[in-house]
Amino acid sequence: MKQSKSSTLGTASISSLLVKQAVPASIGILVMSLNMIVDTIFVGRWIGPLAISAITVVIPVTFFIGAIGLAVGIGGSSVLSRALGSGSHEKALRVFGNQVTLTFLTSGMLAILGLVFQDRLIELFGADESFKDLALIYYRIVMYGIVMLAMCMMGNNVIRAEGKPKFAMYAMMLPAIGNIFMDYILINVFDFGMYGAAWATFISYFICFAFIVWFFIFKSELRLSLDSFKLKRKIVSEISALSSVTLARQGVISVFTVLVNNVLISTGDALDVASYGIISRALMFALFPVIGVNQGFLPIAGYNYGAEKFQRVRESINKSILYSGGLALVIFAVIMVFAPDLVSIFISNKEGQDAETLRNNAEILARTPNALRWVFAATPVIAVQLIGSSYFQAIGKAWPALLLSLTKQGFFLIPLILILPKYYGVFGVWIAFPIADVLSTIVTGYYLNSEVRRTLK
């Protein structure tokens, strides 16, 4: 009976599966994104723009350590989906147990190192004296709970690979709602400032972790034994090969964020870092339905490839690109029209604020809307890049998946960020985004088309 949940990935219509998988994933991502958005709004309106800058420079290290769990989750779940598709339930159990062990050990070690070298890391990530103390407050507390975040990111992808996307959605919704509630209580009611923002985030990690543990004890078809947690070289190698795709992509994103923060500080000032903080939140929030389709596509493609149902794999690719491309076009139109309104949400001009805060708020409102439009300028074409790179990961081809996942940030965006600001200043940072989107889409589209023609006959 439990097996039927995953077996439907090989029998139900692709359209219905995409809806079933993508809608809960999209809702979960939406709520998680709203969490980050509201968190930034509360910090910006109740603490000030420099607090947004502080959170922005902390994100790369917490993002990378949390991405350990995401990488092991996505990479291992590709192996797990194909094991379920081929009927090898014992291998699926072993894979999941090894995912838990790998995530805990790796994220724990990195968290310890992150706390030991916190002062150097904060400066490296672009913090200057105007907001370094705020950044350190947030960083220390969030790092105490980062292992829980990594375990949550891993577990969430395993839940989706089991064919239970609603529970994966709940795993993202509950901590997000908890964080928003605690932000309000700790920042606005108790006036704990940056400490309140940090502890609210820590509590949200704990809520997510508690839910993930509950699911795998009471609801999962993957019943682990102690032996499942013992690392096996062959399985670790298989998980690592595919996890390296996501980890490299997330690692490059972290490096890119550090680079952008430093470039913005050197060519602009701390308020440009705050602008990027707002834009990065908008990127995750606005693209939630596109990312949701991509998340829904992964287990469908992986399961049917493992079951050698290649026509269904082709159909899943085509429909995923069609659906996510249409959604991306709508998002593009909304950003172009409502950019100033979106930015104004993060800024408070209420009476009683000091003159410096009012000046900073006015600068943010003047600088950010056009920057936001440029960053989203090539949004309509990104579906091909996302689905294309994910396809190779879903079918277990780690090397092309790794290369294609790095095309935007690694091969195009980072070099453009290093070159364009020398000639165009801060504006060069913003125009690098659409150029990288177009170039990476061309490369990914070419390789995806070639692979489909060659293998999915």
Image: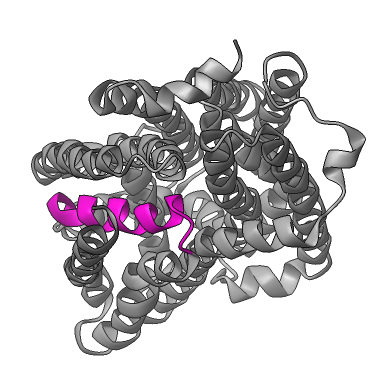
Is 101 left or right of 54, judged from the image as shown? right
* Vertical placement of residue 236 versus 313, above or below: below
Q: Is residue 376 among the parts visible in the rendering?
A: no
Nearest the viewer among 122 and 230 is 230
Which residue extends farthest right? 226
Indicate yes or no whether the magenta region holds residue 384: yes
Q: Position of residue 440 (x, y in %)?
A: 24, 69
Indicate yes or no whether the magenta region holds residue 417: no
Q: Position of residue 407 (x, y in %)?
A: 33, 72
In the image, which residues are magenta? 379-397
* Residue at x 41% of width, y 27% of height: 9
Q: Is residue 290 among the parts visible in the rendering?
A: yes
* Numbered circles on residues, count: 0
Q: Position of residue 363 (x, y in %)?
A: 28, 56
Q: What predominant SS class does the magenta segment belong to? A: helix
Nearest the viewer among 408 and 370 is 408
Nearest the viewer among 79 and 356 is 79
* Residue at x 27% of width, y 89% of height: 422
Q: Position of residue 186 (x, y in %)?
A: 66, 27
* Vertical placement of residue 23 versus 64, above or below: above
Which residue extends farthest top? 1
* Residue at x 52% of width, y 67% of height: 248
Is 427 left or right of 391, judged from the image as shown? left
* Vertical placement of residue 437 versus 1, above or below: below
